[in-house]
Image: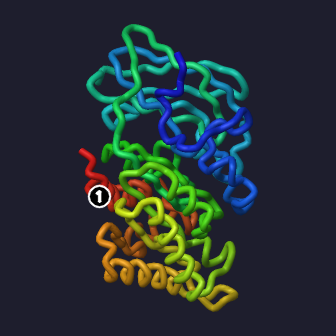
Amino acid sequence: MDPAPFLCGNAFAGNDKVPYPRASLQDTFRLPFDTWMQAQIPATVRLEIAGDASTVDISYRTGTDDLGYRGDGAGRTFQLWRNLSLVSEEKAELGEGTVRLSMGGASDHRAIVYLPEGMRPRVHDVSSAGGSIEPASPRKKWVCYGDSIAEGWIASSPAMAWPAIVAREYGLDVVNMGYAGAARGEIVSAEQIAGLQADVLSITHGTNCWNRIAHSVEQMRANTDAFINVVRQGHADTPILVASPIIRPDGEETANRLGATLGDLRAAMEDVVRARIASGDSALQLVEGLPLVPAEMLGDGIHPNDEGHVTLARALGPTLQKMAGAS
């Protein structure tokens, strides 16, 4: 069976080399190189399946077994979740393969199959046994822009990244535009978001503006305002949640080469959002990032561990659900 109707989270057209890009192939020479490198990883691209089948078979091809710094957390298995629980899991092989996953007994709940995204998979076919399957009903669309924290670094699996948790637990169809080591509010990304259909948007970048490519406070203000401005050109009334960067102990009081601490950049981002709200953007909402994830839930001093991803998801999920009008 053609897998395309079951696929979710793949908002951009792909090709043979990059089947599920998370940025437009037409903009590969306009995007920063680090953004495009991460956009080739199909983070939170998944299959969403309804039906009473007892098993589902997925044939696939993977492109690599080198998962880099993210390691096994980038996914070496296909995981099937149903009714908010992991039902079955099978190892992915390098190259061509097929996995059989149990659908469990909760046929009144959609099954969500997370891919071994770090292995650069392409799904060829989806079939069932012991009953029938069909694409799950559409959900409200959420476009999630961010950095490595949105992409899911150092969660134990793709299913444990906070956007995956929010989508699963609060009934949203997430398009993950989280780019590890990148996502500094580039205007090209804002243009792409402006061109996507969405019921709710979130903007959660900032930490890479402190050290990866240093920003000044003035630059952060100008870039944040410009980014939202361009997004609004395509989404004049779409609800937007902006969450400033979560805590990063090594950056809170240490100035970068342009004299800005992460705390300074966070404040600048928040000031811009507050000013836009005060000027009449009633569909914009700010969440202050500093208190969202306790420092002890940072597994490597930067990224949330599984507990931290859950904490972040449950802090932002209800607001995103309400803003999207999702049930």
Question: Can you say whether 140 is above or below 78 in the image?
Answer: below
Question: Can you say whether 300 is above or below 200 in the image?
Answer: below
Give the farthest residue toward the bottom: 259
Residue at x-position 31% and y-position 77% = 280
- Can residue 208 be seen here? The reply is yes
Question: Can you say whether 169 is above or below 51 in the image?
Answer: below
Say which quarter of the image contains residue 83: top left
Give the farthest residue toward the top: 130
**Of 260 and 10, the residue lying toward us:** 10
**Of 202 and 310, the residue lying toward us:** 202
Q: Which residue is mark 1?
A: 323
Q: Residues within 10 Å of mark 1 (few under 14, many from 20)?
A: some
- Can residue 152 be seen here? The reply is no
**Of 97 and 34, the residue lying toward us:** 34
Q: Amino acid at mark 1?
A: Met
Q: How is the image coloured?
A: rainbow
Question: Can you say whether 192 is above or below 134 in the image?
Answer: below
> Which percent across, then down, holds residue 213?
69, 75
Say which quarter of the image contains residue 177: bottom right
State left or right for residue 306 relative to residue 73.
left
